[in-house]
Amino acid sequence: MRVYTSESVSEGHPDKLSDQISDALLDACLDCDENARVAIETLLTRGLAVVAGEVTVDGYVEVADIVRKAIIEVGYNDTDLGFDGNTCGVMVAIQEQSPDIAMGVDTGGAGDQGMMFGMAVNDTPELMPLPISIAHALTRKGSEVRKANPNLGLRPDMKSQVSVIYDDNMKPQHIETVVMSAQHSPSLNHKQVNEIVRAHIIDPVLKDYQGFVKGDIKFHINPTGKFEIGGPQADTGVTGRKIIVDTYGGMCPHGGGAFSGKDPTKVDRSAAYMARHLAKCIVAAGLADRVVVQFAYAIGVPQPVAINIDTFGTERESTDQIVKRIRENFDLSPRGITEHLGLKKMRYRMTAKNGHFGNPAFPWERTEEAARLKEAVHGR
C-alpha cells in the first residue's frame, strides 16, 4: 500500500490568475492573427500587474484592458479584497520574438528544446489520476459556490489537497486525507468557515467519488485557523509556477516547461498536449492500463529526437511497436500537432483553470484515434 497526494488551486490563486492573464493575452493575439507568436509572462503583487515577453502579431492588442478584465472576472474587483482590477497598476514590457528563434520556427521546427510528458491511467472515466481529479473538483466547486452564493463570505483564493491510498498494483483504494484552504471574509470565524466548506464544497464533491469514501477521512480545513488575506496581496503570482497542478499532480514526470501564454509553436505546450492525447488513446484502445508518453525536441528540428513510452508493466502490446506505429501514423512536428488538434482555433484561457487535462472540451482529450492506433499496432 502507498499514498499519493495531489494539490489544486482555484482561479483566484495568484499564480493561477497570472496564468489566466497570460492566456487571455494569447487569445487576444490569436483573435487578431492565428499565426501570432506569443510568449507572455505575468507577475502579480499587491496593487500591480507586470506583463513581459515576446510577441509578434499582425494586429493591435490593448494589453492593459485585457489584464484588468481578467482580474475582475475572477473576482478581484474591490480594494477590500486586497486586489482590484479596476485600480491596480499595469506595467507592460513586451518585445518581438527573437529572429534567431523565428528562423527555426518559420521552417516548421520546434520553438525550443526540451522534454514533454503525457499520462493516462484508468483510475477515472477521464483517464486521469484520482488524486488530481478530486483536487481539481474541489477547487472548481469552490469557485462555483463562491460566485453563486456571495453571501457565504468566501473569497477568490483557494487551495485543495487530496491523499489517496493505492494498493501494490497501483489501483486506488480510498481517500485518506482532504485539505482545503479557502479565503474568507473577516466576518467569519474558523468554525463557520469549516461548516461552509464541508457543506457546500467537500461533501458534494465526495458524493461523486463515493466508491473511494471508506472509513474515516482526515479533513483539514483552513488548518492555520484564518485565511482572510489572500490573492496577490498575500503572495506574488507568476505565470508557470503551478506546472504540477496543471498536469498530473505529481503522478507523472514533468519536463519543466510551463504552458500558459505560449502559442502552439512552443512544444512545451503543444507537444505536451499531443503526449496526453496519445497516452489517452493508448489506454482507451486497451493497449495498457497506465502509460506515460515522453517526447524530446531540439530547437529548429520538426520531429521529436526521441519518443519513450512507459506502461509500468500493464502493456498488452510491445511498447517498441507502439512507438513505431505512432511515428508512422502521426506527424509530431509542431505544425502537424497544431493541425491534428486544431490548436490555432483553440482559445486557451479556460485551460488555466483546474488543469490542462481531463476536461472533455479540450481537443487533446478526444479518443477517436484509439481504434486507429489499435488497428495499427495489430498490423491490420
Image (cartoon, rainbow, N blue to C red):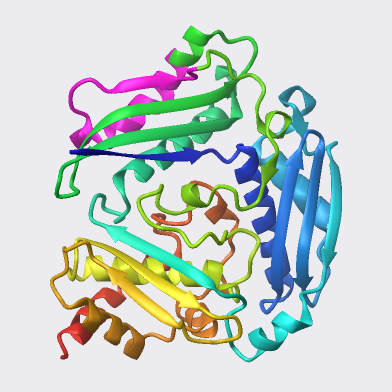
Whether residue 186 is visible to the viewer of this picture, yes or no, is yes
Left or right: residue 369 compared with residue 41: left
Q: With respect to residue 154, does 212 lie above or below?
A: below
Residue 260, image quadrant: bottom right
Depth check, front residue: 116 or 64? 116
Across and down, in percent, residue 264 comes to 58, 73
Q: Which residues are magenta?
A: 195-223
Taking the spot 36% from the left edge, 45% from the top edge, the residue there is: 133
Q: With respect to residue 324, does 191 lie above or below?
A: above
Residue 17 located within the stretch drawn in magenta: no
Across and down, in percent, residue 368 comes to 30, 73
Q: With respect to residue 70, does 209 lie above or below?
A: above
Left or right: residue 345 compared with residue 249: right
Residue 195, image quadrant: top left
Taking the spot 70% from the left edge, 74% from the top edge, the residue there is: 37
Taking the spot 23% from the left edge, 20% from the top edge, the residue there is: 216
